[in-house]
Image: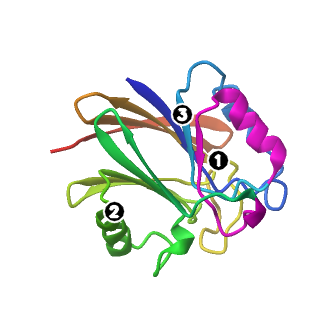
Amino acid sequence: MTLVLVLGDIHIPQRAADIPAKFRKLLVPGKIDKILCTGNLTDRATLEYLRSITPELYIVRGEFDDKAQNYPVSHRLMEEGLCVGLINGHYMVPAHGDVDTLAATARQMDVDVLVTGSTHRFEAYEEQGRFFINPGSVTGAFSPVEAEPIPSFVLMEMKMGQDVVAYVYQLVDDEVIVDRIEYHKS
């Protein structure tokens, strides 16, 4: 089993001051195997914080990331028998979570699980036999497409045999709410 932290749209300090303290308490070193970041990791201190959680960190470029960071636009990795794609939704046309565009991107990348960002809104669903996850904004950073983003991130428990259990953490009214979503590759 592999535990993968999925987060993105951080925007510190431009749109948010920090990752909420209640989330930081949950994200401790030694428990998480990998991190997938959908981009907009705009400050060095947050990058170092994520590296302190686990050195196995995959980041794709968001529209506000410094190009000097040299993050790729997309990334593909194999984990527990599943192919996972990572991309910031800003680079898709139309952008902002269009289901058909996401499905076409997943087919083009040839992935079982597609992780995207840019909308600042958590979403997870199965479509055309594939699993789609948008972790939202871990800081709850404002966005022109989401009036009041809810801070959120996802922990994906990936098990050999092509199973994913996604635990969604959302900060609602200063309380951490956790939901569970399962996906099994057919």
- Which label lies toward us, 1 or 2? 2
The CA span between labels 3 and 1 is 16 Å
Task: Determine whether the residue tagged by mark 3 lies in a helix, strand or loop.
Answer: strand
Q: Which residue is mark 3?
A: 34
> Residue most toward the left?
186
- Residue 146 lies, in percent from the top left, at 60, 68
Q: In the rendered view of the protein, which quadrant contains the N terminus? A: top left
Q: Is residue 106 left or right of residue 90?
A: left
In the displayed structure, 155 sits above or below 147; it is above
Q: Which residue is mark 1?
A: 138
- Which of the pair 18/163 is nearer the observer? 163
- Residue 69: numbered disc: none
Q: Is residue 51 left or right of residue 95?
A: right
Q: Amino acid at mark 1?
A: Val
The CA span between labels 1 and 2 is 23 Å
Residue pictured at 58% horizontal, 65% vertical: 118
**Which numbered disc flags the more N-terminal residue, 3 or 1?**
3
- Residue 106: numbered disc: 2
Q: How has the structure been colored for display?
A: rainbow
